[in-house]
Image: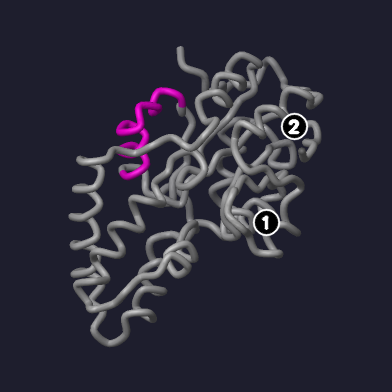
Amino acid sequence: MSMLPAFDAVLFDLDGLVLDTESTYLHAWRRAAAEFETVLSDDVGHALFGRHADGVMQALQVLIGPRFERSRFEAAASKYWHEYLDSHGIALMPGVTRLLEQLTQRRIPYALATNSDARYAELCLMRAGIDAWFRVRVSRDQVRAGKPEPDLFLEAARRLAVPSGRCLALEDSLTGLTAACRAGTLPVLVQARPVAVEALEMAIAHFRTLDQVADAIESTQLSTDPQCPYHSQVT
């Protein structure tokens, strides 16, 4: 198992790291792409994960070609996505609850830094039943630029009053790891699927699940400032 350096706070990605929203996206994108007579494979779908909305739409425009109409695609995808949520809900990724409880018990501040917009993040967290856990959230619509730029992580660290270099940044995508590196955080890859070599080279540690992250934290020396003004625990 990978080891972790000393740290003072934890920054979480949302999609594919805290919540299994990626399966909901893939379903919606596939159904919408079918309306344009296009098949969206697993490989192509997985390559879209971690990107902000504009990046996803740009990639889909290339895939679908001249027939692509963004407004029509987004409307169809939104309809299929909400239908899927109504039928299946959103599952937590393995180890999420355990890790959040561990951080709370040890008074380690944490925050959410997501490429999604605030309204969408709120909806997903509520559907999954964990919205009360994340008091500190930074979303794409609250910063100048989303991932792979560093803005989200820098703002999350600022709100926690912890230097970015003392924050673990938990990510499951190359896009997210790039942002974490640019922000000067301690980038940690959490991904069970095969990953690109570049992602492995960027990460200071690699875990398959958040349960493994929690195991590593148990044996990590911490220097969390008890006076930190923001602690994301449920009160």
Q: At which x and y percent is residue 174?
A: 60, 59
Which is more foreground, mark 2 or mark 1? 2
Q: Is residue 129 magenta?
A: yes
Q: Which residue is mark 2?
A: 7
User: In percent of the image, x 40 and y 69: which residue is there?
Assistant: 41
Above or below residue 146? Residue 101 is above
User: In percent of the image, x 66 and y 34: which residue is there?
Assistant: 212
User: In percent of the image, x 68 and y 37: which residue is there?
Assistant: 167
Q: Is residue 45 left or right of residue 101?
A: left
Q: Which is nearer the eye, 40 or 5? A: 40
Question: Which residue appears farthest toward the bottom when viewing the image?
Answer: 66
Type of amino acid at the residue the image marks with label 1: Arg
User: Taken as a whole, is the magenta stretch helix, strand or loop?
Assistant: helix
User: In percent of the image, x 72 and y 51: which residue is there?
Assistant: 203
Magenta range: 120-133
- Occupied quadrant, residue 25: bottom left
